[in-house]
Image: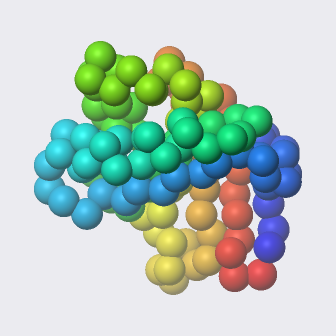
Amino acid sequence: MIVTGTAGSISHYSEAQLVVQEQVEDSLDKVIEKALRKKLSKLVNTMAVKRILLLERQHMNLPPQKMLDEIEKRKAEFPDLTRVDEIWILETPFYGTAFGGTWARFELYEKGTVVKSFDLDVGS
């Protein structure tokens, strides 16, 4: 396993609870709501040094900011979001293709800009 990027090594986040949800439906609002209903309680009730919500982005036509905006809209409905330390986007649109191979990218956004990222070769 190879890890590169600005976030440090994967072990830096080994004590965090990770939750993964991929977009499998047409309606982003419903996908985000379903993910939060299913996973948020488990995430915030897990003993962890840092709580990281990890969302998978498989489709190029879905901008990461749109996903984050959809979560932001639901803060009143899901007050436990205040207990999440970071929300990362796992970029997999090219994973498993001839172009992307076995690489995946993790990105942390602040105000619409990637502030941390790392690439992970899960094939090594």
Q: Is residue 69 left or right of residue 26?
A: right
- List the single residue furthest toward the left: 26
Residue 73 seen by the camera = yes
Above or below for 107 versus 83: below
User: Residue at horizontal 61%, vertical 44%?
Assistant: 46
Which sits in the foreground, 10 or 47?
Answer: 47
What's the image's color scheme? rainbow
| Occupied quadrant, residue 79 | top left
Could you say where residue 115 lies in the image, as x and y percent from the top left? 65, 29
Q: Is residue 5 left or right of residue 105?
A: right
| Occupied quadrant, residue 48 | top right
Which sits in the foreground, 6 or 86?
Answer: 86
Could you say where residue 3 lies in the image, as x and y percent from the top left? 79, 60
Above or below for 76 versus 70: above
User: Residue at horizontal 14%, vertical 49%?
Assistant: 27
Q: Specify the quadrant that holds the C terminus.
A: bottom right
| Occupied quadrant, residue 72 | top left
Q: Specify the quadrant that holds the N terminus.
A: bottom right
Could you say where residue 45 lies in the image, as x and y percent from the top left? 55, 39
Which sits in the foreground, 70 or 37?
Answer: 37
| Number of on-image labels | 0
Could you say where residue 65 lies in the image, as x and y percent from the top left? 38, 32
Above or below for 95 versus 24: below
Above or below for 79 versus 36: above
Which sits in the foreground, 39 or 52?
Answer: 39
Q: Is residue 1 left or right of residue 89?
A: right
User: Residue at horizontal 63%, vertical 37%?
Assistant: 51
Residue 4 seen by the camera = no
User: Residue at horizontal 42%, vertical 64%?
Assistant: 93
